[in-house]
Amino acid sequence: MYSRRVAAIKSVSVIGAGLMGSGIAQVAAQADYKVTMVDQTDAALQNGKNIIQKSIERVARKKFADDKDKQQAFINKALDNITLSTDSLAAAQSDLIVEAIVENIDVKQKLFAGLDKAASKDTIFASNTSSLPITAIASATTAERQTRFAGLHFFNPVPAMKLVEIIRTATLTDAVYQDLVDFSIKTGKTPVECKDTPGFIVNRLLVPYMMEAFRILDRGEASAKDIDTAMKLGAGMPMGPIELADFVGLDTTKFIVDGWAKEGRIEPALVQPSKTLEDLVAKGHLGRKSGKGFYDYSK
Ligand code: CAA
Ligand code: NAD
Protein backbone atom coordinates (compact mmCIF):
# COMPACT_ATOMS: atom_id res chain seq x y z
CA MET A 1 0.00 0.00 0.00
CA TYR A 2 1.33 3.41 -1.02
CA SER A 3 1.81 5.95 1.74
CA ARG A 4 3.01 9.53 1.34
CA ARG A 5 6.70 10.11 1.78
CA VAL A 6 8.39 13.43 2.43
CA ALA A 7 8.98 15.05 -0.98
CA ALA A 8 7.62 11.90 -2.62
CA ILE A 9 8.42 13.14 -6.11
CA LYS A 10 12.04 14.00 -6.83
CA SER A 11 12.43 12.79 -10.38
CA VAL A 12 10.05 13.03 -13.33
CA SER A 13 9.93 11.39 -16.73
CA VAL A 14 8.03 13.08 -19.50
CA ILE A 15 7.15 10.91 -22.46
CA GLY A 16 6.61 12.84 -25.67
CA ALA A 17 8.83 15.81 -26.52
CA GLY A 18 6.30 17.74 -28.59
CA LEU A 19 4.54 20.98 -27.73
CA MET A 20 3.31 19.77 -24.35
CA GLY A 21 5.98 17.29 -23.27
CA SER A 22 8.76 19.82 -23.82
CA GLY A 23 6.86 22.41 -21.77
CA ILE A 24 6.18 19.99 -18.91
CA ALA A 25 9.84 18.89 -18.91
CA GLN A 26 10.90 22.54 -18.82
CA VAL A 27 8.75 23.64 -15.88
CA ALA A 28 9.72 20.52 -13.92
CA ALA A 29 13.43 21.14 -14.61
CA GLN A 30 13.06 24.81 -13.61
CA ALA A 31 11.54 23.59 -10.32
CA ASP A 32 14.67 21.46 -9.79
CA TYR A 33 13.24 18.03 -10.49
CA LYS A 34 15.52 15.59 -12.28
CA VAL A 35 13.79 15.13 -15.63
CA THR A 36 14.07 12.44 -18.29
CA MET A 37 12.42 13.50 -21.55
CA VAL A 38 11.62 10.62 -23.87
CA ASP A 39 10.52 10.48 -27.50
CA GLN A 40 10.73 7.97 -30.29
CA THR A 41 13.46 9.55 -32.37
CA ASP A 42 16.46 11.83 -31.92
CA ALA A 43 14.78 14.30 -34.28
CA ALA A 44 11.71 14.49 -32.03
CA LEU A 45 13.95 14.99 -28.98
CA GLN A 46 15.84 17.73 -30.82
CA ASN A 47 12.52 19.42 -31.64
CA GLY A 48 11.61 19.34 -27.93
CA LYS A 49 15.02 20.66 -26.97
CA ASN A 50 14.64 23.58 -29.41
CA ILE A 51 11.22 24.46 -27.99
CA ILE A 52 12.67 24.43 -24.46
CA GLN A 53 15.70 26.53 -25.46
CA LYS A 54 13.55 29.31 -26.94
CA SER A 55 11.08 29.30 -24.09
CA ILE A 56 13.60 29.16 -21.24
CA GLU A 57 15.53 32.10 -22.69
CA ARG A 58 12.29 34.04 -22.58
CA VAL A 59 11.62 32.99 -18.97
CA ALA A 60 15.20 33.86 -17.94
CA ARG A 61 15.05 37.31 -19.58
CA LYS A 62 11.86 38.03 -17.69
CA LYS A 63 13.16 36.71 -14.35
CA PHE A 64 16.55 38.44 -14.44
CA ALA A 65 15.91 41.38 -16.75
CA ASP A 66 19.24 43.20 -16.44
CA ASP A 67 21.57 40.41 -15.46
CA LYS A 68 22.85 38.23 -18.29
CA ASP A 69 25.00 36.09 -15.95
CA LYS A 70 22.00 35.22 -13.78
CA GLN A 71 19.95 34.47 -16.90
CA GLN A 72 22.60 32.05 -18.14
CA ALA A 73 23.04 30.42 -14.70
CA PHE A 74 19.26 29.86 -14.46
CA ILE A 75 19.16 28.37 -17.97
CA ASN A 76 22.18 26.11 -17.36
CA LYS A 77 20.84 24.83 -14.03
CA ALA A 78 17.46 23.91 -15.52
CA LEU A 79 18.90 22.35 -18.68
CA ASP A 80 21.36 20.32 -16.59
CA ASN A 81 18.35 18.72 -14.91
CA ILE A 82 17.11 17.29 -18.23
CA THR A 83 18.30 13.99 -19.71
CA LEU A 84 17.09 12.90 -23.15
CA SER A 85 16.28 9.34 -24.16
CA THR A 86 14.66 7.41 -26.99
CA ASP A 87 14.03 4.43 -24.69
CA SER A 88 10.60 4.71 -23.06
CA LEU A 89 11.68 2.21 -20.40
CA ALA A 90 14.35 4.73 -19.26
CA ALA A 91 11.34 6.68 -18.03
CA ALA A 92 10.41 3.89 -15.64
CA GLN A 93 13.13 4.90 -13.17
CA SER A 94 11.44 8.17 -12.11
CA ASP A 95 9.08 8.83 -9.20
CA LEU A 96 6.49 10.36 -11.54
CA ILE A 97 5.86 9.59 -15.22
CA VAL A 98 3.87 12.14 -17.21
CA GLU A 99 2.78 10.95 -20.62
CA ALA A 100 2.30 13.59 -23.37
CA ILE A 101 2.27 11.54 -26.58
CA VAL A 102 -0.22 11.44 -29.43
CA GLU A 103 -3.93 11.65 -28.45
CA ASN A 104 -4.73 8.00 -29.22
CA ILE A 105 -6.00 5.58 -26.62
CA ASP A 106 -4.44 2.43 -28.09
CA VAL A 107 -0.98 4.01 -28.27
CA LYS A 108 -1.26 5.41 -24.75
CA GLN A 109 -2.46 2.08 -23.31
CA LYS A 110 0.37 0.20 -24.98
CA LEU A 111 2.93 2.63 -23.57
CA PHE A 112 1.56 2.43 -20.02
CA ALA A 113 1.23 -1.38 -20.09
CA GLY A 114 4.97 -1.60 -20.82
CA LEU A 115 5.88 1.03 -18.23
CA ASP A 116 3.78 -0.70 -15.58
CA LYS A 117 5.95 -3.81 -15.81
CA ALA A 118 9.21 -1.85 -15.75
CA ALA A 119 8.48 0.78 -13.07
CA SER A 120 8.71 0.53 -9.29
CA LYS A 121 5.40 -0.14 -7.54
CA ASP A 122 5.56 3.36 -6.01
CA THR A 123 5.90 5.22 -9.32
CA ILE A 124 3.02 7.56 -10.03
CA PHE A 125 1.62 7.49 -13.56
CA ALA A 126 -0.09 10.49 -15.13
CA SER A 127 -1.49 11.30 -18.53
CA ASN A 128 -1.67 14.79 -20.02
CA THR A 129 -4.50 13.69 -22.32
CA SER A 130 -6.83 16.46 -23.48
CA SER A 131 -9.91 14.33 -23.84
CA LEU A 132 -9.49 10.59 -23.28
CA PRO A 133 -10.87 8.90 -20.15
CA ILE A 134 -8.05 8.44 -17.63
CA THR A 135 -9.80 5.34 -16.30
CA ALA A 136 -9.67 3.75 -19.76
CA ILE A 137 -5.98 4.58 -20.25
CA ALA A 138 -5.18 3.29 -16.76
CA SER A 139 -7.05 0.03 -17.41
CA ALA A 140 -3.95 -1.14 -19.31
CA THR A 141 -2.14 -1.31 -15.95
CA THR A 142 -2.60 -3.40 -12.81
CA ALA A 143 -5.30 -2.65 -10.25
CA GLU A 144 -2.60 -1.55 -7.81
CA ARG A 145 -1.15 0.94 -10.31
CA GLN A 146 -4.62 2.34 -10.90
CA THR A 147 -4.52 3.67 -7.33
CA ARG A 148 -1.51 5.77 -8.46
CA PHE A 149 -2.78 6.81 -11.89
CA ALA A 150 -4.23 10.26 -12.55
CA GLY A 151 -4.76 12.87 -15.21
CA LEU A 152 -2.32 15.77 -14.97
CA HIS A 153 -3.51 18.19 -17.61
CA PHE A 154 -1.24 21.14 -18.39
CA PHE A 155 -2.05 23.94 -20.82
CA ASN A 156 -0.28 25.30 -23.88
CA PRO A 157 2.16 27.07 -23.66
CA VAL A 158 3.03 25.24 -20.45
CA PRO A 159 5.65 27.71 -19.19
CA ALA A 160 3.12 30.56 -19.41
CA MET A 161 -0.23 28.97 -18.51
CA LYS A 162 -0.74 28.77 -14.76
CA LEU A 163 -3.34 26.00 -14.54
CA VAL A 164 -3.11 22.24 -14.05
CA GLU A 165 -6.22 20.07 -13.95
CA ILE A 166 -5.75 17.03 -11.73
CA ILE A 167 -8.14 14.32 -12.82
CA ARG A 168 -9.29 12.22 -9.96
CA THR A 169 -10.45 8.76 -10.91
CA ALA A 170 -12.49 6.58 -8.57
CA THR A 171 -9.39 4.53 -7.74
CA LEU A 172 -6.81 7.28 -7.13
CA THR A 173 -5.70 7.46 -3.49
CA ASP A 174 -5.78 10.69 -1.49
CA ALA A 175 -2.03 10.39 -0.82
CA VAL A 176 -1.14 10.28 -4.52
CA TYR A 177 -3.60 13.06 -5.29
CA GLN A 178 -1.84 15.20 -2.68
CA ASP A 179 1.59 14.38 -4.15
CA LEU A 180 0.31 15.65 -7.51
CA VAL A 181 -1.04 18.81 -5.90
CA ASP A 182 2.41 19.40 -4.36
CA PHE A 183 4.12 18.74 -7.69
CA SER A 184 1.79 21.13 -9.54
CA ILE A 185 2.37 23.90 -7.01
CA LYS A 186 6.13 23.38 -7.08
CA THR A 187 6.11 23.79 -10.87
CA GLY A 188 4.39 27.16 -10.37
CA LYS A 189 0.88 26.07 -11.31
CA THR A 190 -2.51 26.35 -9.65
CA PRO A 191 -4.16 22.92 -9.52
CA VAL A 192 -7.89 22.37 -9.87
CA GLU A 193 -9.60 19.03 -9.35
CA CYS A 194 -12.02 17.40 -11.76
CA LYS A 195 -13.72 14.03 -12.11
CA ASP A 196 -12.83 11.81 -15.07
CA THR A 197 -15.27 13.41 -17.51
CA PRO A 198 -14.94 14.29 -21.25
CA GLY A 199 -12.60 17.28 -21.59
CA PHE A 200 -12.51 17.76 -17.82
CA ILE A 201 -13.25 21.48 -17.19
CA VAL A 202 -11.36 23.58 -19.73
CA ASN A 203 -11.69 21.47 -22.87
CA ARG A 204 -15.33 20.63 -22.17
CA LEU A 205 -15.96 24.34 -22.65
CA LEU A 206 -13.18 25.30 -25.05
CA VAL A 207 -13.35 22.58 -27.71
CA PRO A 208 -17.09 22.95 -28.56
CA TYR A 209 -16.46 26.72 -28.77
CA MET A 210 -13.59 26.21 -31.24
CA MET A 211 -15.69 23.72 -33.24
CA GLU A 212 -18.52 26.22 -33.60
CA ALA A 213 -16.00 28.79 -34.86
CA PHE A 214 -14.90 26.29 -37.56
CA ARG A 215 -18.54 25.77 -38.51
CA ILE A 216 -18.97 29.54 -38.95
CA LEU A 217 -16.14 29.21 -41.47
CA ASP A 218 -17.71 26.10 -43.05
CA ARG A 219 -20.94 28.02 -43.57
CA GLY A 220 -19.06 30.99 -45.03
CA GLU A 221 -20.54 33.38 -42.47
CA ALA A 222 -17.33 35.21 -41.52
CA SER A 223 -13.60 35.07 -42.23
CA ALA A 224 -11.08 33.48 -39.87
CA LYS A 225 -9.52 36.86 -39.21
CA ASP A 226 -12.86 38.47 -38.36
CA ILE A 227 -13.90 35.56 -36.08
CA ASP A 228 -10.60 35.96 -34.19
CA THR A 229 -10.84 39.75 -34.04
CA ALA A 230 -14.42 39.47 -32.80
CA MET A 231 -13.58 37.14 -29.94
CA LYS A 232 -10.49 39.13 -28.92
CA LEU A 233 -12.11 42.56 -29.00
CA GLY A 234 -15.67 41.54 -28.21
CA ALA A 235 -15.12 38.86 -25.60
CA GLY A 236 -11.67 39.69 -24.19
CA MET A 237 -10.01 36.43 -25.29
CA PRO A 238 -6.19 36.56 -25.56
CA MET A 239 -6.45 34.66 -28.86
CA GLY A 240 -9.41 34.08 -31.17
CA PRO A 241 -10.69 30.48 -31.53
CA ILE A 242 -9.16 29.95 -34.99
CA GLU A 243 -5.66 31.07 -34.02
CA LEU A 244 -6.00 29.12 -30.80
CA ALA A 245 -6.74 25.94 -32.76
CA ASP A 246 -3.63 26.56 -34.87
CA PHE A 247 -1.73 27.02 -31.59
CA VAL A 248 -3.08 23.80 -30.03
CA GLY A 249 -2.49 21.77 -33.24
CA LEU A 250 -5.23 20.87 -35.71
CA ASP A 251 -4.40 17.15 -35.52
CA THR A 252 -4.80 17.21 -31.73
CA THR A 253 -8.05 19.19 -32.04
CA LYS A 254 -9.40 16.67 -34.56
CA PHE A 255 -8.30 13.68 -32.42
CA ILE A 256 -10.22 15.18 -29.48
CA VAL A 257 -13.43 15.72 -31.44
CA ASP A 258 -13.30 12.40 -33.32
CA GLY A 259 -12.65 10.57 -30.05
CA TRP A 260 -15.65 12.18 -28.38
CA ALA A 261 -17.88 11.50 -31.40
CA LYS A 262 -16.87 7.81 -31.30
CA GLU A 263 -17.25 7.42 -27.54
CA GLY A 264 -20.67 9.05 -27.35
CA ARG A 265 -20.02 10.55 -23.91
CA ILE A 266 -20.76 14.09 -25.10
CA GLU A 267 -23.75 15.64 -26.87
CA PRO A 268 -23.43 14.78 -30.64
CA ALA A 269 -24.25 18.35 -31.76
CA LEU A 270 -21.12 19.61 -29.99
CA VAL A 271 -18.83 17.28 -31.92
CA GLN A 272 -20.26 17.57 -35.45
CA PRO A 273 -17.21 17.49 -37.74
CA SER A 274 -16.04 20.59 -39.58
CA LYS A 275 -15.14 20.25 -43.27
CA THR A 276 -12.56 23.04 -43.07
CA LEU A 277 -10.78 21.28 -40.18
CA GLU A 278 -10.93 17.89 -41.92
CA ASP A 279 -9.46 19.31 -45.14
CA LEU A 280 -6.58 21.08 -43.41
CA VAL A 281 -5.57 17.99 -41.40
CA ALA A 282 -5.80 15.78 -44.51
CA LYS A 283 -3.33 18.14 -46.22
CA GLY A 284 -0.94 18.00 -43.25
CA HIS A 285 -1.63 21.62 -42.31
CA LEU A 286 -1.56 21.10 -38.55
CA GLY A 287 -1.23 24.70 -37.36
CA ARG A 288 1.79 26.56 -36.07
CA LYS A 289 3.84 23.44 -35.44
CA SER A 290 3.78 22.52 -39.16
CA GLY A 291 4.09 26.10 -40.44
CA LYS A 292 0.53 26.26 -41.79
CA GLY A 293 -2.99 25.72 -40.51
CA PHE A 294 -5.88 28.11 -40.85
CA TYR A 295 -3.13 30.74 -41.10
CA ASP A 296 0.30 30.67 -42.75
CA TYR A 297 3.29 30.82 -40.37
CA SER A 298 5.99 30.12 -42.92
CA LYS A 299 7.18 33.74 -43.09
N1 CAA B 1 7.45 30.22 -22.92
C1 CAA B 1 7.63 31.00 -21.85
N2 CAA B 1 6.87 32.10 -21.59
C2 CAA B 1 5.92 32.41 -22.49
C3 CAA B 1 5.68 31.63 -23.63
C4 CAA B 1 6.50 30.49 -23.84
N3 CAA B 1 6.36 29.68 -24.89
N4 CAA B 1 4.66 32.18 -24.33
C5 CAA B 1 4.26 33.26 -23.64
N5 CAA B 1 5.02 33.41 -22.53
C6 CAA B 1 4.87 34.42 -21.50
C7 CAA B 1 5.53 35.73 -21.86
O1 CAA B 1 6.86 35.78 -21.40
C8 CAA B 1 4.66 36.75 -21.13
O2 CAA B 1 4.93 36.79 -19.76
P1 CAA B 1 4.64 38.14 -18.88
O3 CAA B 1 3.24 38.57 -19.17
O4 CAA B 1 4.85 37.71 -17.47
O5 CAA B 1 5.64 39.12 -19.39
C9 CAA B 1 3.28 36.14 -21.22
O6 CAA B 1 3.47 34.73 -21.42
C10 CAA B 1 2.50 36.74 -22.37
O7 CAA B 1 3.27 36.58 -23.55
P2 CAA B 1 3.39 37.68 -24.70
O8 CAA B 1 3.23 39.05 -24.11
O9 CAA B 1 4.60 37.43 -25.53
O10 CAA B 1 2.25 37.31 -25.69
P3 CAA B 1 0.74 37.37 -25.48
O11 CAA B 1 0.34 38.42 -24.51
O12 CAA B 1 0.23 37.40 -26.86
O13 CAA B 1 0.42 35.95 -24.81
C11 CAA B 1 -0.18 33.71 -24.83
C12 CAA B 1 0.75 34.75 -25.41
C13 CAA B 1 0.16 33.49 -23.34
C14 CAA B 1 0.04 32.44 -25.60
C15 CAA B 1 -1.66 34.24 -24.96
O14 CAA B 1 -1.92 34.58 -26.30
C16 CAA B 1 -2.68 33.26 -24.49
O15 CAA B 1 -2.95 33.13 -23.31
N6 CAA B 1 -3.31 32.56 -25.47
C17 CAA B 1 -4.32 31.55 -25.16
C18 CAA B 1 -3.62 30.27 -24.78
C19 CAA B 1 -4.60 29.23 -24.37
O16 CAA B 1 -5.80 29.40 -24.30
N7 CAA B 1 -4.04 28.06 -24.06
C20 CAA B 1 -4.82 26.91 -23.73
C21 CAA B 1 -5.02 26.08 -24.95
S1 CAA B 1 -6.03 24.69 -24.64
C22 CAA B 1 -5.00 23.60 -23.94
O17 CAA B 1 -3.83 23.80 -23.76
C23 CAA B 1 -5.63 22.32 -23.51
C24 CAA B 1 -5.74 21.22 -24.46
O18 CAA B 1 -5.82 20.07 -23.99
C25 CAA B 1 -5.83 21.40 -25.93
P1 NAD C 1 2.73 16.85 -30.38
O1 NAD C 1 2.26 16.28 -31.68
O2 NAD C 1 3.33 18.20 -30.36
O3 NAD C 1 3.80 15.87 -29.70
C1 NAD C 1 3.58 14.51 -29.47
C2 NAD C 1 4.95 13.83 -29.33
O4 NAD C 1 4.75 12.49 -28.88
C3 NAD C 1 5.72 13.75 -30.65
O5 NAD C 1 7.01 14.30 -30.46
C4 NAD C 1 5.77 12.26 -30.96
O6 NAD C 1 6.96 11.86 -31.60
C5 NAD C 1 5.68 11.66 -29.56
N1 NAD C 1 5.20 10.29 -29.50
C6 NAD C 1 4.15 9.74 -30.15
N2 NAD C 1 4.01 8.44 -29.78
C7 NAD C 1 5.00 8.17 -28.89
C8 NAD C 1 5.40 7.01 -28.15
N3 NAD C 1 4.73 5.86 -28.26
N4 NAD C 1 6.46 7.12 -27.31
C9 NAD C 1 7.14 8.27 -27.18
N5 NAD C 1 6.80 9.41 -27.86
C10 NAD C 1 5.76 9.35 -28.69
O7 NAD C 1 1.49 16.75 -29.40
P2 NAD C 1 1.16 17.66 -28.12
O8 NAD C 1 0.39 18.84 -28.57
O9 NAD C 1 2.39 17.82 -27.30
O10 NAD C 1 0.12 16.72 -27.35
C11 NAD C 1 0.55 15.64 -26.54
C12 NAD C 1 -0.57 15.25 -25.60
O11 NAD C 1 -0.93 16.38 -24.79
C13 NAD C 1 -1.85 14.78 -26.29
O12 NAD C 1 -2.46 13.79 -25.48
C14 NAD C 1 -2.69 16.06 -26.31
O13 NAD C 1 -4.07 15.80 -26.39
C15 NAD C 1 -2.32 16.66 -24.96
N6 NAD C 1 -2.48 18.11 -24.84
C16 NAD C 1 -2.23 18.93 -25.92
C17 NAD C 1 -2.36 20.30 -25.75
C18 NAD C 1 -2.09 21.26 -26.88
O14 NAD C 1 -2.48 22.42 -26.79
N7 NAD C 1 -1.42 20.85 -27.94
C19 NAD C 1 -2.72 20.84 -24.50
C20 NAD C 1 -2.94 19.96 -23.42
C21 NAD C 1 -2.83 18.59 -23.60
Image (spheres, grey):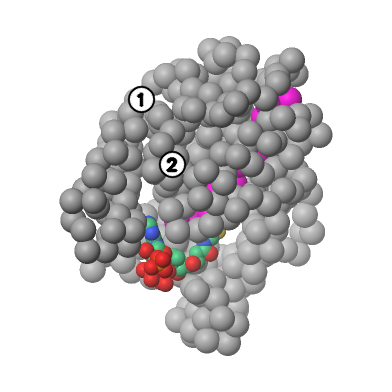
Quadrant for ligand 1? bottom left
Q: CA distance from mark 1 to mark 2?
A: 23 Å
Q: Which mark is drawn over residue 31?
A: 2
Q: Which residue reaches farthest left?
A: 69
Q: Is residue 160 visible?
A: yes
Q: What's the residue at 60%, 39% (across, down)? A: 182
Q: What's the residue at 70%, 35% (across, down)? A: 177
Q: What's the residue at 50%, 45% (across, down)? A: 187
Label 2 sits on what residue type?
A: Ala
- Decide: is 154 above or below 148: below
| Mark closer to the chain start, 1 or 2 | 2
Read off the magenta span. 147-157
Q: Position of residue 174 (x, y in %)?
A: 76, 32
- Dividing the image into 4 quarters, which one contains the C terminus? bottom left
Question: Is residue 124 rendered magenta in the image?
Answer: no
Q: Which mark is drawn over residue 25?
A: none
